[in-house]
Amino acid sequence: MSDQNIKNLVILGGGTAGWMTASLMVKVLGKSLNITLVESDKIGTVGVGEATIPPIINFNQALGINERDFLKATRGTIKLGIQFENWLRQGDSYMHAFGSIGKNFPFCDFHHFWRRSRASGDESSLWDYSLNYQAAIHNKFAHLAQIKGTNLPGISYAYHFDAGLYAQYLRNYSESKGVGRIEGTVKSVQVRPQDGFVESLLLEDGQSVSGDLFVDCTGLAALLIEKTLGVGFEGWSQWLPCDRAMAVPSAGSKPIVPYTRSIAHAAGWQWRIPLQHRTGNGIVYSSRHWSDDEAREVLMKNLDGEALAEPRVIPFRTGRREKQWDRNVVSIGLSSGFLEPLESTSIHLIQSAATRLIKSFPHQGIKPEEVSEFNRQSQVEIERIRDFIILHYKLNERRDSEFWRECESMSIPQTLEHKIELFRRTGKVFRDYDDLFTEVAWQQVMIGQGIFPQDHHTIADNLSEEQLRDLMGSLRTLIDGTVKSLPDHEKFLASLN
């Protein structure tokens, strides 16, 4: 490894990955680091990542971004969760709603009390106790840290936004703080013969861009991490069978709902993401089960507004780079791996990788121990997310197509098998310290996908039948009253202007 001080950081590739990385780097390390981003207007970005999860708020706040300005600039809307339609069976739906459900109890999650109540004849849904869900389906939103007059948490949210506008917003931010941008296309990459470290990028116009550390944000092309350094790829198609996506924007429709929709079809699923000025749509599918023409037909007939462009096909491989950091190249974004956008994790993985790089940033040279730990954390993170996405496919009761029958019968990672069976038998789910998704997230998807636990925690028996009825009834009343007092989502959006 190199003992050279890291003074010059070169980010290859713009788009969401490049400019998110540049903006965080310059905010935190800009006083001690020269940062250059190389991108070409001739090379398009995938740019389908228009839905996010709540940690994006922390990212924007770390940069000092004003939420009102950001939402106006990116034509953004609020996201309270993801509605899954037809995933368990045709006609069924449930939501992975952000935030908490019910009331938190020491040592025992709320769904155990709900499960005991259901066993006693209560017909309420788990989502009757989710403030986020009730606000979402009633198209309501306001900033609410706590439910008034209680210590119960309020609304947790994320955003939908135009990914191209977000990248432009962060580009303006980064350049204003000193990031240098070079327009150009890479002709060749110069590496040190003794150790394979990247020395410089030679551009088509003859410019040479040298650096001490390089960040590969070239997307699926993986120009540095794969094509130059030859780092391999671990595929996960045995668990995640979809290998193509097709994206198309459509005219906006009313109401602008504060949630993402994920609609399962015979050989994949469709996303619908409402923005202020249009709707983002796409379909993720398996090429073994559908041709591009078949996928296009399903996508286009299920738009809720006029198509604003021709659909574009995006082939992909699900899996991860065997090493996200190799020598002096760190891959961030699609160059480091791909997980389909089912749980809106693509932008989050960019955020977490950039954050991890700052925490592990080399000082007096690149140390192998630092690189190894970075790669270990990256692997654990993406494998935990992988399991959560596989969960949606595995737990289905659809028998209407070969695709869904294969998903239901496939073998799954032992880590996921253990989680499912533990929840099925006991109702318990434990979050690993480095798991992105909370216990409440796992509970919602497993219950939404058809698992009603066979047992509940013994603490749930501490309440008498009357106390349990009072608890459940008072929580429903409190949530219903809170939702009624919230303004409409579109009224909130109108207030931005």
Image: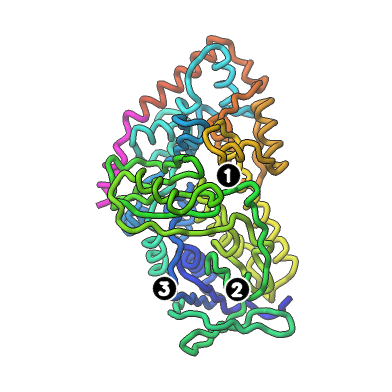
Quadrant position of residue 373 = bottom right
Mark with earlier residue (3, 2):
3
Residue 85 has which mark? none
Crowding near the residue tagged with mark 2, few <14, some 14–19, many ≥20 C-alpha atoms within 10 Å: many
Pointer 3 residue: 175
Across and down, in percent, residue 325 comes to 66, 67
Which mark is nearer the camera, 1 or 3?
A: 1
Residue at image position (55%, 17%) is: 118
Under mark 3, the amino acid is: Glu
SS assignment at label 3? helix
Determine the CA span between mark 3 and mark 2.
24 Å
Predominant secondary structure, magenta span:
helix
Under mark 2, the amino acid is: Leu
Pointer 1 residue: 389
User: Nearest the camera: 5 or 20?
Assistant: 20
Pointer 2 residue: 224
Across and down, in percent, residue 349 comes to 55, 56
Residue 358 in sight from this viewpoint: no
Determine the CA span between mark 1 and mark 2.
28 Å
Count of numbered marks: 3
> In this picture, which residue range is highlighted in magenta?
483-497
SS assignment at label 2? loop
> CB of mark 3 within 8 Å of CB of mark 2?
no
Across and down, in percent, residue 249 comes to 34, 54
Under mark 1, the amino acid is: Ile
Residue 326 in sight from this viewpoint: yes
Is 485 contained in the magenta span? yes
> CB of mark 1 within 8 Å of CB of mark 2?
no
Left or right side of 470 for 373: right
